[in-house]
Amino acid sequence: MGNRKVIAIMLLEIRNLTVRYRRSGDDWDRPAVSGLWVAVEQGEKLAVVGESGAGKTTIAHAVMGILPPMTRVEGEIVYRGQRIDSRMPEGIRGKEIVLIPQNAYNSLNPVLPAGTQLEDLQAEDGVPSPLRRQQLRSMLQRVRLTDPDAVLASFPHQLSGGMKQRVLLAMGLLREPRLIIADEPTKGLDPVRRLGVLELLKDLLAQKQQSLMLITHDIRAAVFLCDTVVMMYRGELVEKLPVSRLYEYSSHPYTIALLNASPQRGLQAGQNAGNGISTGGRGCSYVACCSQSVPVCGQERPVWREIYPGHLVRCHVVA
Amino acid sequence: MGSYIARRTLAAAISLAGVSLMTFLLVFLVPGDPAEMVAQARFGHGVVEWEIEMVRRTEGLDRPLAVQYLKWVSHLLQLDLGHSLINRQPVMSLICSRLPATLLLACSSLLLSLLAGVPAGVIAAVKKGTRLDSVLRIIALAGVSVPGFWLSYLLIIVFALKLKLLPVGGYGTLANLVMPSVVLAAGMAGLTARLLRASLLEVLQQDYIRAAVANGLSNSKILWKYALKNALLPVVTVIGLRVGMLLSGTVIIESIYGWPGLGKLMLDSIYTRDFPVVQGCVLVSAACFILLNTCVELIYAWLDPRIRWGTGR
Amino acid sequence: MIKMSKKKGYIVVWAGLGILLGVALFAPWLTLHDPYEQNLANRFAPPSAEYWLGTDELGRCVFSRLVVGTRMSLFIGAAVVSINAVVGSLIGLLSGFGSRWIDALVMGLLDIVQAFPGAILTLAVAGILGPGLPNMILALTVLGWAGHARFVRSMVLSLNEREFIESARSLGYGSFHVLFRHVLPNCLGPILVFSSMEMAGAIMMAAGLNFLGLGVPVSTPEWGAMLNQGKDYFRTAPHLAAFPGLAIMIAALEFNLLGDYLRDRIDEGGLIDEWKD
Amino acid sequence: MSLLELRNVSKVFRAGWFKKIEVVAVREVSLRIQPGEIFGLMGESGSGKSTLGKLALGQMLPSSGEVWWGVEDRLAVQGIAQNPYGAFNPRHRIGFALEEPLVYHDLVKDKQERRRRIGELLNLVGIGEECLGRYPGQLSGGQLQRLAIARILLLNPRLIVADEPTTMLDLPVQAQIIKLLKTVNACTGASILFISHDLHLVAATVERAGIMHGGRLVEVGYIQDLINKPAHPYTKLFVASALADAVCRPSVNDAFGAG
């Protein structure tokens, strides 16, 4: 993917990103993300799908520039032709690119009313105070909070989990961003609430031509909201394909295993999962858990192969 | 909020009742017969049997303990703490004449410790891992570990005897206040800085701070508006509890600097075995402490909306 | 720990503990002179090659008295902290693990005991009981257990919420088994941290009582008592008060550092918060 | 005779000092679970399904109503926790944790015999013996959940209450645990009360299920019936939400057949 000439205008490009966290002293963890290339076009809805520990959230935090201090980052992150990895230029973070954080329960400041936290964002943009309330009210109505004034006056602990999540959505959308990064918006929700959140997101995104980077473990949510899916396994991308091809034509053994393991397919448990034998950094990252591996998988790192326009796989077995 | 205040006040009243009982029982720790002790103080050494017996009768020391306690409490409610064994003065008036000096000292050192400890804690947390952080942490730890009575002498030697900047002791002017306040504030400031640093570091890792950063808020706004108020919550509680340490510290420090406060009164009375006065000092300082802690809890409730609205904790 | 990696800082902590314990253990062999020997011809001598830290008002060797005093100060601290830790932990375990009535009773008692400004009651008790080592230890433990009890109780309560305690109960283990095989082993580390920090406080408080003459007899070689005697001569012979005070501070600093270090090492799941210093 | 019977059970939590606050977690629920069946309990968070699980385990007493167990020994009712990472004492090795119930309840006296019994169960749950010397912190969530299942099997349970046993696990591991629960049910004949918010998961696991909403058990029936002809309005909503974004998939219809 790296050598392809980019023709469409890329909103966000991540080039060869590697992130390592420091354990202690000079002891570095296995890279949370390694050698990652991803691009999001203007208006594109991209889903990054993987299990916990695959490094999905690390990508989101790297783009936002909010990785913890003891982290080693290599590679480039380019937003509209401008590098934002080493230094985030003014007016991009939180304005052009926003993050809808994963943990709704703890992502609002417990000692400030929700209204104050929203108004602080407006203050950053220089919205004059008389206009603020009106703007907030209409924003909260857009995220389907029925009593905006009560919500604005509430402290976070007075709001339910779902309401907090909607306030966070409102915070994200308030400043009309070009790119929204939504980190696990459906995690831990029961079906009724999950569907509510997904439909709300779909509606909101349909109103404006904004780009979305959905980070999720929930393949169905990805199918529901996005056009393109990238599959991530232990810090690396293994497959990229249009959503329309996902169920029938996905080819990477990991994608197939994940699809089969979902309850809708009768929970076919894989042969083996997640004991993570190291390949010494040489072979395919999935070789230890792969049911179809051949000797070359353990020795050589597979390269990207385009098996259909827009459908790329990184696997020795899929030819 | 109203029910919260009512609840705290009730709890304070219960503590006060318990404190009065324990203070009353203190006198029974005195080795020997309390009647003999009172008689000795009243009639001089070499008292005879009938004198002790008379004291026992007049003071009601032959009655059951519960009756004695009730009598003591009923006097207490009329603000009567008995009389000094030494100079027969009412204990209450002795204490009242000394209390302002101690409160002045306690307040000024509390203020001083916050003025030093809060900025030090914030700077150390923000500059975590740098040389400045290490230096501040060592100073804070030294402040916690230094014995006040020793620091007093060091300061006297340096600032009063060598540099002749401040008076050796005494009461009345601002210059008299400086050294005892600094000594008392040292431990408190170190504690505040250490607690605030740890608590701020913890808060800075929270999701809501990360979210605020991702929202593009400026660093100073995040620190002062979003992080500090959360970080102060645990610190406020501990400071409230540790003001007791400050009050205790006054006992030794006041004696060293000749500061005419409650602490000096208490220590002098311990040396002269004037137990009603000791008892009164303990009771009054405990009452001050309870009052103060109730205030701290109300401040805490004001800082933390989760408590104000009667949910959580 | 300026410009020092964490590891090196920890070496300093352990070395400091080793030196303190070593001096306390081998005190009689580390002295320069007999710490009780008076030499009225050589009073108030400043530090010299013969008397490293000078001599006091009776011509006794300050260095030797400090060395022997280490034993006394650490012994008092250790005795006080062990009593407080054992009594407090037992009460805390009982309160956290027992019935609601026991818990309410213990909490009520703790609320009252801790309503006194810490050292004032200790001072009053020590003053009323009169001087002497046992009386002093009694005064320091009358209230000291309360902090331990509250700490252990809150720890037991938070452990009670953990799944493995719940599953131990549902596997049919009796209360005693759960308490001693599952709860207590998870408390021991934090109790150690707490005790180490308490040790610093106990050493300082004991020195304070001795300084006021409410503890061991004044002539005993003990840091607080030495300071007490030295304070009368602080204008003419400041070294008499300076060195014992320094010793107290170093010991307190060491145990505070040790507590910090142990907390970094042991604290799992945030059971120990910053409440204790 | 049924293995577990709840008769008109309610559970009310009370809190507050001056103002009494009452929260009704479970409202007049009656339910029977037969020996050897896997019964699913669904509902959104806060619907009272976990409280019902605790009542079935006997960890909680009902405020009103009765809970009957058709077992001789209380130890025959066991639970599997949601969070496998917390299920084992972090200070004990796995080997000790597995031997502990046998020793404490004096079930197997001989040491060799104990080892053999533990080995058997490890084999059943598919974990190698090398984990016996490890501490819980060194094992993955999936492994710990298998070990937790092995540990309760030592006590020969007749009823196993599994409250969201897979929510903290990844998808493939989740599938393995469900498979294991089915194996356990087949091999030991123990009934399983399977509590989950995920309709798909329940559909793939159980035959009969109930749906809870606001503390009430609104509908009980065979899982196919619940999905294909839900009677209660809430069941309709619950099923429709769960299926809403899954209809585009080809294999969805066989999935419920496979359950």
Image (cartoon, helix red, strand yellow):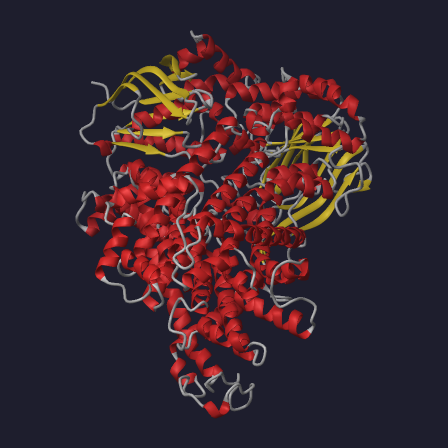
| Residue C28, picture quadrant | bottom left
Q: Residue at the location (55% across, 79% down)?
A: C239
Quadrant location, the C terminus of chain A: top right
Instruction: Check the image and report above or below for D1 versus D94.
Output: above
Instruction: Check the image and report above or below for B110 versus A258.
Output: below
Which residue is at the front of the view, D149 or D16? D16
Question: Is A228 left, or right, of B263 in this rendering?
Answer: right
- Where residue B291 appears, x then y in whole percent? 50, 41
Q: Can residue C179 be seen in the rendering of this structure?
A: yes
Which residue is at the front of the view, D153 or A177? A177
| Residue A133, picture quadrant | top right
Q: Can residue A314 be seen in the rendering of this structure?
A: no
- Where residue A216 appears, x then y in whole percent? 59, 31
Which residue is at the front of the view, D16 or D236? D16
Say how many tags the image has: 0
Q: Which residue lies furthest to the bottom in this view?
A: C41
- Where residue A170 appears, x then y in whole percent? 68, 25
- Where residue A245 appears, x then y in whole percent? 63, 25
Question: Is A307 left, or right, of A297 in this rendering?
Answer: right
Instruction: Check the image and report above or below for A236 versus B4.
Output: below
Instruction: Check the image and report above or below for B39 versus B103.
Output: below
Quadrant location, the N terminus of chain A: top right
